[in-house]
Amino acid sequence: MKKTKDIRILIINPNSSKEMTNDIQRAAETYADGEFTVRTVSTPGAPEFIDYYIDAALAAPGMMQIIRDNYHEYDAFIVACHCDPNLDLLKEFCDKPVIGIGEASMKMASMLGHKFSVISTGSHSIANKEMLIHKYGLDSSAASVRAPEIDAASYNSADLFMSAAQAAIEKDAAEVLVLGCAGMAGIDKQIQEKFHVPVLDGIICALMMAVGMVKAGYTTSKYRQYSGPEK
Amino acid sequence: MKKTKDIRILIINPNSSKEMTNDIQRAAETYADGEFTVRTVSTPGAPEFIDYYIDAALAAPGMMQIIRDNYHEYDAFIVACHCDPNLDLLKEFCDKPVIGIGEASMKMASMLGHKFSVISTGSHSIANKEMLIHKYGLDSSAASVRAPEIDAASYNSADLFMSAAQAAIEKDAAEVLVLGCAGMAGIDKQIQEKFHVPVLDGIICALMMAVGMVKAGYTTSKYRQYSGPEK
Amino acid sequence: MKKTKDIRILIINPNSSKEMTNDIQRAAETYADGEFTVRTVSTPGAPEFIDYYIDAALAAPGMMQIIRDNYHEYDAFIVACHCDPNLDLLKEFCDKPVIGIGEASMKMASMLGHKFSVISTGSHSIANKEMLIHKYGLDSSAASVRAPEIDAASYNSADLFMSAAQAAIEKDAAEVLVLGCAGMAGIDKQIQEKFHVPVLDGIICALMMAVGMVKAGYTTSKYRQYSGPEK
Amino acid sequence: MKKTKDIRILIINPNSSKEMTNDIQRAAETYADGEFTVRTVSTPGAPEFIDYYIDAALAAPGMMQIIRDNYHEYDAFIVACHCDPNLDLLKEFCDKPVIGIGEASMKMASMLGHKFSVISTGSHSIANKEMLIHKYGLDSSAASVRAPEIDAASYNSADLFMSAAQAAIEKDAAEVLVLGCAGMAGIDKQIQEKFHVPVLDGIICALMMAVGMVKAGYTTSKYRQYSGPEK
Amino acid sequence: MKKTKDIRILIINPNSSKEMTNDIQRAAETYADGEFTVRTVSTPGAPEFIDYYIDAALAAPGMMQIIRDNYHEYDAFIVACHCDPNLDLLKEFCDKPVIGIGEASMKMASMLGHKFSVISTGSHSIANKEMLIHKYGLDSSAASVRAPEIDAASYNSADLFMSAAQAAIEKDAAEVLVLGCAGMAGIDKQIQEKFHVPVLDGIICALMMAVGMVKAGYTTSKYRQYSGPEK
Amino acid sequence: MKKTKDIRILIINPNSSKEMTNDIQRAAETYADGEFTVRTVSTPGAPEFIDYYIDAALAAPGMMQIIRDNYHEYDAFIVACHCDPNLDLLKEFCDKPVIGIGEASMKMASMLGHKFSVISTGSHSIANKEMLIHKYGLDSSAASVRAPEIDAASYNSADLFMSAAQAAIEKDAAEVLVLGCAGMAGIDKQIQEKFHVPVLDGIICALMMAVGMVKAGYTTSKYRQYSGPEK
């Protein structure tokens, strides 16, 4: 079995923002704490922010290329955008574990409380998050998807996220919160301190599962749909 | 942040079978591989096997006692019976992470394929597993719960499990299998080799999440229901 | 067939509050109206109020003991706490009918209107009620679970329940209300008079089904899971 | 409160078959056992058997007429066809309790086991029963709807029902059976003796609820949809 | 294959209001634009407005008579009331296509956005619309059913519908609106201009499907339940 | 309003197979019957057959390019692969109607019978179809997804499809069948003749909706998620 210290995880930031890549890498390193190797890369050819279906489509070739280029060097791959862009594609594309931060964080949230809410960057993405929740069968575990009233794609407006969090907890009866964007790193601590509910960061949830899967030798089933075309 | 080598996980085998406790401990140690501390204890006062609601009820006081006695020494607790007996109770009882092997393995299975099946020890427990699947919102991810045609509570009849696995894969279109009993350790490798689908052992799934949660500082929400009565 | 006048129902108040036991007994006697025998007992060793998972666990041994001690004298047993504590356990434990007031009242409510709401004692228990609703498959019949804004576990604050009822009816479109606590007896009449919707008391719903099942000779299936361990 | 001996229940057989009306009345009297008054009437103008949507539509005027003619003499009304024809209509039409044997029996079945199956008269009606199950939110409690392989509308072919019952129990894991036709009275005892699972007769389930509702003063909510047009 | 110009669609207005029949016919002709034949008829013997279950029942004989009288002259039939009264009955009654404007418009709405809301005439009908949504499996596509705060059965109070529409869009996150009444024709354009979301008129949705089904030779399956009784 | 004769529909065959493009065009022309213009194009850069997630991803750029190149000349676009590849992307990308043959055919099937089955090309794609059914909320309307026992991607093996159809009808109680591949054109007639149930071809279902939407001026909501990024 692989030793943790030999495990190497590659985090794919599906967008091309170096700033967000750095933020993710910092959060990942803090969690890794030197015990395993983690590296975050931006996706070449992808837009600055993954917000719409077209952003995901434009990122797909770059994301596959990243896996192709790093396949031998890394043991597992994380898709670091909370809408899990191209996740089914990459699970099929790769026979090593591929984990989406949306799926990992929402499934973990459902283990830590009766109901969770997702704090999203903007109101336009609520429908998209709700579709993910339905896809993952989490309808009965989800309290709500909340977004700041005005658009916060710039992701530094902590106050707005704070009131969205408060509404989720007090009006929607959420017991756990999930950060709905890889670029929200850091806000989790602030919300947690103020409201005393667990606030999950998808990067961290995905990292713990990735390390665990590699140690256990678990990976995506290649039986049926995820097998991909014969080579 | 806690270093992995300092993390201590206690696995509660909710029954009183020393043999099963030893099997679980062996599987857990193989996974831990010396990187963190794991110990498995039998539940005093519990029956030999947790099969029915009364078995779970009889195990409850002993399970709480185990947490009380080991609270300070351990960082997280695992309930090592696939029907997750008293899991809500212990999540409420304890402010450190408590993970059920049923919940952990079935939620992880839903990340590794479109549909999973649970291989259960006996046909009488199918309804119970189906209720768990419904409780966790996994209805649309579950292909089936399969049990050997004749009762296999003695859990050593590999052939019977093998045909149940085959039926799940070929007739129910399962892409991932989940071992439905903590005492099935070892069978996973055999099934995986024969059918080439991932076969998840709940002990291992729970261990990876426990270690991850401890590192991340995540635990059950104490807001609302899981807060427990005021002390 | 048993004559109604010979039917004897035992109501198990899962907590140890004599006051609540008396309230329940009064409500039950009013309904029984001398036509059958009904007796309510407190649960020895149980806490004063069943609010949390641990309360249910602590009540379990006493509840089983009550059935053991009264098995031959009574024809059916009612669990008189709206969160149905240990209901599956007792259905398995006993081959005579065991009815939970939560299950009985919510299933009956779904027969008297398109949508029902549960009026609960406190906001911390909303998640628990919602899990029960999901367990019983009543998601599409439930309008909401409402609780007074401030905690009302003392269950005498009629005004608070009144505004929760009003919100359920006017904002959530509930057509039927269900009292979410065995200790709310008496409030049903007040709400019904003010808002002209049926308000169901679980004790009464459970009693009518218990009497009917005894007359009909219906009881819990002992095929598969509810069979309990071999004796 | 009304005394049970003064309660009068009218069973509406939605078809015009005198033979089936007599069968239903016999089953009802056996259950009533002289403790309350029950009378069964055939529906004038209705077809011989209610099998299709048009049969239900043709029965509607006669069913309303029966309620109009007997409103003052009876305390509650039962619709004695397992597909619950015109049940919403009659709940709206009448401010006394109206109970469908399909709804009553299937909701009661879900209280006596983890999963129930309906034994239906013919394969053409399976879709209709499944729609009822979905309407009542019982999808997760229903194991299956089974019908004899060849059409058994003549409802005397006990052997065929016996094998349908066996398949439901052994292949679909049903723990409780529900007779899917008011005209199957009598077969319940045979199946129960052979397979040792509860077999529910909708007439009896509806009668116990009707008597209970009358005693309790519960009836259909007249708030919103079931209010019917202003008079 | 039938040429569009030879296709003849009959719209059944299930009520007896000539005014509403004329409104529907006008909307239908605008859409038909002379390319196929469409005629709208009122239902003899039906009430002025279909609001309650009894209205639907009273309309049933007239609706069947309309199909009987016009069967040979028309190629498809539309039920022009948004609660789809007697739709299953007519699908069974007729072997040519029968389309309900509720089903057609809500299923089409689910193709044009992630979530749709229905704007209903009055708050009493919300439960009924929600049951239709559940029947059609559209729970996860429906944002809400909204009705004007005060009753608007007179269907000319555009302002009230406007605020209901606004609430659906802004509070419930609806991306598409569906007019909940055949008599709302014309309001769709006003809402669409103000809020820039698609507003579907059921008459138009049903017409496009009716024409298409006739051209394609598609009609209701006569296998099993919709076969109706043997003739 | 646009006249039907002026309507121009472009069918995007997401793969690059000229043979399948020709088959689709033939089926489309037969339905169009000269009344409107329809043209089918292969997708440049796409694989020969769309079977896996990567096939869809590889087809995405070509599909967008087709819309870009033909935006002004056509009124609506159809995605002619039954797994609806890139459908959300194209609904967002284009402000004219975009219709998937999977979504159109399965939603229409749910209008023509209580339950439908999809006949798929191969067993590996069953999971994918089931996910689509879940995404569209059609779980309760779907009887099954059936595929020929041996792989039939070559799509000419009529006999294999015939037995899959028979199993769906007889064992799964399907009342309507849906062809699960754009390349199955022609088989619908054979199955329909043999089994007398409607067999829907997605191309035809999508065409009728496309023509209707163009006439009605209906298109994808550009409010929230489908708005796409600002230009």
Image (cartoon, coloured by chain):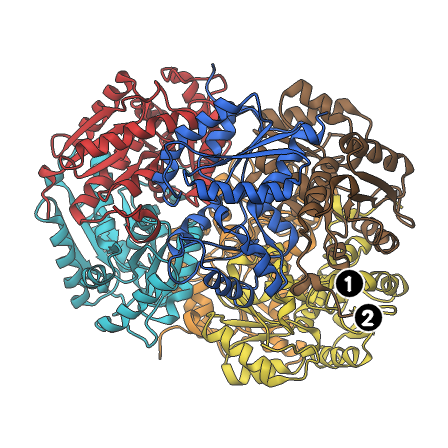
Chain colours: A red, B cyan, C orange, D yellow, E brown, F blue
Structural crowding at the residue carrying mark 1, measured as other residues with C-alpha within 10 Å and reported as few (<14), some (14–19) or many (≥20): many
Give residue D100's quadrant in the image: bottom right
Q: Which residue lies under the disc numbered 1?
A: D56
Total marks placed: 2
Q: Is residue A85 left or right of residue A97?
A: right
Callout 1 amino acid: Ala
Q: Which residue lies under the disc numbered 2?
A: D47
Q: Is residue C129 left or right of residue B81?
A: right
Is E155 or F159 nearer to us in this picture? F159
* Residue E184 x, y percent position in the rendering: 78, 31
Residue D139 visible in this rendered orientation of the protein: yes
Disc 1 from disc 2: Cα separation: 9 Å
* Residue A36 x, y percent position in the rendering: 13, 34
- Examine the rendered structure and indicate whether residue B20 appears above or below residue F185: below
**Mark 1 falls on what kind of element?**
helix
Q: Is residue E142 left or right of residue E182?
A: left
Callout 2 amino acid: Pro
* Res. E34 mark: none
Give residue E110's quadrant in the image: top right
Structural crowding at the residue carrying mark 2, measured as other residues with C-alpha within 10 Å and reported as few (<14), some (14–19) or many (≥20): some
Residue at coordinates 85% horizontally, 63% vertically from top-left?
Answer: D67
Is C1 or C20 nearer to us in this picture? C1
Chain on which label 1 sits: D
Chain on which label 2 sits: D
